[in-house]
Amino acid sequence: MQSLQITLPWPPPSLSPNKRQHWRPFAAAKKAYRAACYVETLRQVKGKATLPDRLRVALDFAPPDRRKRDRDNLVASMKPGLDGVADALGINDDRFETLEARIVTTLTPAKGAAHVVVTITDAWRPPVIERGPDGMPARMML
């Protein structure tokens, strides 16, 4: 398995850990986002994917605007979405060994273009090291 890349919708603001709300609308928002991510994963994967036991998950957030966001809150709001991805792949999310989050900034985001790209790779795959002209390591690709 090289990598599996899935584009998911931006999580709704009601899933933010900083949002103070009653448990019932919070549970409904979690259920709806989990189902949406489940359907998107099934639509994009098209068939069974053979996955190793330990997985590395990279989340690339393309936000709807240029406001500053806290990475911890973004990852926490993606929990139902990652559960939906795991459900669609037929795995338990405890196989996600490492989780990294990046915020990708766009200069002119189109309306409704906010999304999260989930890249799943083998956690035990050794990194590829690109070497510079002097033979020293220049960049490491995970």
Image (spheres, rainbow, N blue to C red):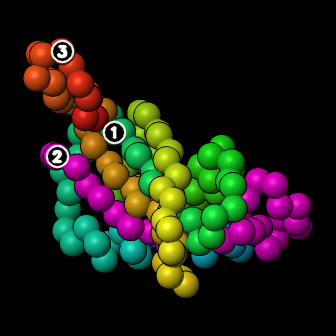
Q: Quadrant of residue 20?
A: bottom right
Q: Amino acid at mark 2?
A: Gln
Q: Quadrant of the C terminus?
A: top left
Q: Earlier in the sequence, mark 2 or mark 1?
A: 2
Residue 5 lies in the magenta stretch: yes
Q: Which residue is mark 3?
A: 136
Which-is-in-front pick, marks 3 and 1? 3
Q: Amino acid at mark 3?
A: Met
Secondary structure category for the residue under label 2:
loop
Dot 2 and dot 1 residues touching (CB under 8 Å): no
Q: Which residue is mark 1?
A: 55
Q: Earlier in the sequence, mark 3 or mark 2?
A: 2
Dot 3 and dot 2 residues touching (CB under 8 Å): no
- How far is the residue under mark 2 from the one under mark 1? 11 Å
Would you say residue 20 is visible in this rendering? yes
Q: Amino acid at mark 1?
A: Leu
Numbered tag placed on residue 135 in the rendering:
none
Residue at figure coordinates x 43%, y 34% from the top left: 98
Asked if residue 1 is positioned above or below residue 10 in the image, the reply reads above
Q: Which residue is mark 2?
A: 2
User: Which of these two is toward me, 24 or 105?
Assistant: 105
Residue at figure coordinates x 27%, y 43% from the top left: 121
Residue at figure coordinates x 51%, y 75% from the top left: 109
Q: Earlier in the sequence, mark 3 or mark 1?
A: 1
Secondary structure category for the residue under label 3:
loop
**Residue 70 percent coordinates (x, y):** 68, 48
User: Which of these two is toward me, 43 or 134?
Assistant: 134
Q: Quadrant of residue 6?
A: bottom left
Q: Residues within 10 Å of mark 3 (few under 14, many from 20)?
A: few
Q: Which residues are magenta?
A: 1-26
